[in-house]
Image (cartoon, helix red, strand yellow):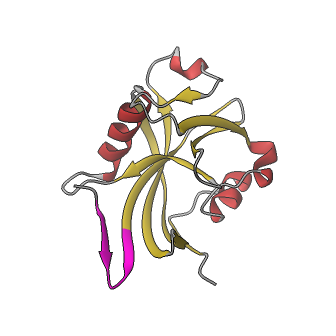
Amino acid sequence: MDLSVVLDEIKLNIRSCGIMIHDNKLLVHNNTNESHVALVGGRVKIGENSEDTLKREIFEEMGKEIEILEFVSTIENFFEADDMPYHEIMFVYKIDFKDENDKKITETIKNVEGQDELKYDWIDLDKIDEYPLKPDMLKELLKNNKYFGHGINDERK
């Protein structure tokens, strides 16, 4: 069971995601039904740690094994989606593929679960401001290559 529950009319999400950069391009999760892109990853399951979540999610969605390189940040993310306020806690890691051949992939990666609306694209870090990457504070983190221990992103204002 995902750690995603509605409490007091606010959805609490616990998410683990990864920053994977190859040739100055960032791998992002792109749901064609949404107006934004996000870091790859997914929801933590009850009893599962955030590193195992990230490994599981990427294997389930892309069929690829990853390694966790380092912890980057915990972000408290407040936003609204589908008329529901969210309080999301994100664990962010720097990651890479385990397989050397996977590290050479430059094209869009398709979802292996059969969800055609999900794909994984590489976006140019030099043009990061042109992409609708959420949460917004990730752009500054990536542009400055300055990782922080804790951040708060509040889009409710």
- Quadrant for the N terminus in the image: bottom left
Counting from the top left corner in percent of width and height, residue 110 is at 52, 28
Counting from the top left corner in percent of width and height, residue 138 is at 63, 58
Query: Residue at image x 26%, y 53%?
Result: 45
Query: Residue at image x 41%, y 34%?
Result: 61
5 part of magenta stretch = yes
86 part of magenta stretch = no
Whether 75 is drawn above or below 33: the answer is: below
Counting from the top left corner in percent of width and height, residue 91 is at 43, 57
Frontmost residue, 26 versus 110: 110
Whether 83 is drawn above or below 2: the answer is: below
Q: Is residue 30 left or right of residue 96?
A: right
Residue farthest to the top, as pictured:
101
Query: Residue at image x 46%, y 75%?
Result: 84
Q: Main secondary structure of the magenta part?
A: strand
Q: Which corner quadrant of the image does residue 103 belong to?
A: top right
Q: Which corner quadrant of the image does residue 29 belong to?
A: top right
Which segment is the magenta one?
3-12
Q: Is residue 121 left or right of residue 45?
A: right
- Quadrant for the C terminus in the image: bottom right
Whether 57 is drawn above or below 8: the answer is: above
Query: Residue at image x 67%, y 52%?
Result: 142
Frontmost residue, 81 versus 128: 81
